[in-house]
Amino acid sequence: MFSKLSLRVKLVGAFLVTASLVVVMSYLNLQTIDVVHRSFSEIVHEHMPRISTLQDMRALAVKLDKETAVYRSGQADAVSTETQKNQLLADLEKMTDLENDYVELSKTVQPGDKKEDTTGVLAAITRTKQETVNAVFELVSMKEQRAPANLIVEKENELANAEAALENAISVGVEQEMNTTDTASQLADKQAHDQRTRTLWVSVLAGMFAVFIGLLFSLSIAHRVKRLREGAIRVAQRDFSRQIDIQSKDELGQLAMAFNQMSASLQDSYGRLAFENERDTTLLESMNEGMIALDEHGRIVLINAAAARILELHDRQMAIGKDFSVVASLQEQGGTALAPVQLPSAITLKTGKQTSAVVLYASKEGKKEQIFLGASPFRLNGKIAGVIMLLRNVTKEKEVDRMKTEFISLASHQLRTPLSAIKWFSEMLLAGDAGKLNAEQTEFAQNITGSTTRMVELINSLLNISRMESGRIMIDPKPTDLTELVQGIINDLTAKIKEREQNVVVSVHPDLPKINLDPRLISQVYLNLLTNAIKYTPKNGDISVFVSKKDDMIVSQVTDNGYGIPQAEQARMFQKFFRAQNITKVETDGTGLGLYLVKSIVESSGGKIWFESEEAKGTTFWFTIPLSGMQAKKGEVTLEQTSTKV
């Protein structure tokens, strides 16, 4: 039954028992104090008044002795003698009063407190006092009657003896009262001692009982806590073979039960984790892409075989715990060493955003391999705990891209010659150089000319994109007035704007300084955005261009209220050859390369581009350019000028 009680009930019970013992000891101590108080109160209230009265009587007896001595000497005159007699009689009367007080005080003496001694003392005092009074009055009478001298001397001697007897009786009374007081004090001391002894024994027994209870509880709790600790150590060592055996139903027993349940759950979890770990390890090792896990300080905590193969690490375990920038010596595309802070992993740890880059890695054979690095953060409790970095050797991919770009460039160049000839001959036909054409022939020639023009524009766009991707574009910044640049493009597009009866508003911040830009490149950005706005905005539509300054960036905004872009297709807006479905139904012409080219130019200039659009309500594009301008770059070619025809 005791084992079924909760630990709280047991502790409260032990506390109540101990508290009860403390209360009992406190009660016994109070009793001891009460006994001592009563005993000494009896001494003070019973014995001390009688002693004080006897002391007063003895002092008065001494005074009487002195007064009778003066009176007996007869040296005073008649007046003095009379005064002395009256004083003597008054003191005798006072003695009688003290005697009566003593009689009253003696009535409180209990039969067991030597009452017979008190009675004897009282009788002796009464007798000797009476003898003294009688002798005094007789002596006074004899002196007044002038009795013989020998009788007076005899009476004086008798008075002296009576007074001595009175003093002796009073002294005996005082001594007896003092003895009685001493006896009462000793009795009070004995009672207090006995009470203290009982209290001490009870305190000792209570202390022993409290120690016993404390030891019993502490040993019981310590034994069960020891079992819990041993069980925790086994679990920490992943030994789930035994459970904690605690049969009690109190809190410790419930804790042991919960611990056993937790142990069983951990055993199951460890089993699942072992399976998942083996599965993940197999998956990581079978990946063709390299994977490296870094901690929050950029140190390697995990590296798979593919990553070790890419970085030519023969013992990848040696890389664990080292900084990634130390393990892999990487270079920028230009061949300069890549600083640790420029690594995608370092940027991701700092910003918490996904980062990627293509860098150069010098192999042991001296070859420059192009490595793609993609870094993604992983968080713990809302804080960045590390980075997962993917590695891929993209040397072959880049080579294929280069060959593809060169092919497109070569093919485009080769196509431009026959296309130019076709366009030239078709224009000659329309001009009547081969004779006048009838209506049907004119229509055919016009179709040939229009198609050829679109083909030339497509070829120019492909050439521009291949040149941007190959990095061969020359950037030649010049101080440029954006007001003049934008207005010049609007002037080039005036004919089409009037044809579609559209309203165009241009607003350029008046305090903008000239920006160091490559006007050919930035013109392509404005031209493509405005061409799209005109083309994809119905007649009588509104188009606006705003150029302003925000912090250290130039912000340009091109807005229309045209067809808009469907929400489901907005993520693909800057992809090559993409055209929204709602646009293709309205305008069949278009290559889908303009926005890709715009994005490439803006990002290569150190800016960014974004947009907002709602179908059937219009679109707004924003792009930024650093106020500091564009960086000059040597190159081989420039962009082909795109036609302003829409």
Image: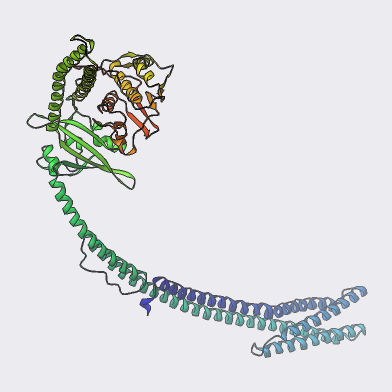
Q: Residue 612: where, in percent of width, then height? A: 37, 33
Q: In this image, 63 relative to 646: left or right?
A: right
Colour option used? rainbow
Is the residue 441 above or below the residue 541 in the image?
above
Q: In which quadrant will I find the N terminus?
A: bottom left
Is the residue 104 above or below the residue 239 in the image?
below
Name the residue nearer the viewer: 622 or 138: 622
Is the residue 625 above or below the residue 352 in the image?
above
Q: Report the label total.
A: 0
Q: In which quadrant will I find the C terminus?
A: top left
Q: Residue 604: where, in percent of width, then height? A: 26, 24
Q: Quadrant of residue 58?
A: bottom right
Seen at 16% across and 21% down, the residue is: 412
Name the residue nearer the viewer: 82 or 427: 427
Q: In this image, 13 relative to 427: left or right?
A: right
Name the residue nearer the viewer: 627 or 316: 627
Q: Could you tell me if residue 350 is visible in this image?
A: no
Q: Residue 630: where, in percent of width, then height? A: 30, 19
Q: Residue 508: where, in percent of width, then height? A: 41, 19
Q: Could you tell me if residue 109 is visible in this image?
A: yes
Seen at 82% across and 86% down, the residue is: 154
Q: In this image, 325 relative to 546: left or right?
A: left
Is the residue 284 above or below the residue 632 in the image?
below
Q: Quadrant of residue 310?
A: top left
Q: Quadrant of residue 433?
A: top left
Name the residue nearer the viewer: 321 or 538: 538
Residue at the farthest front position: 438
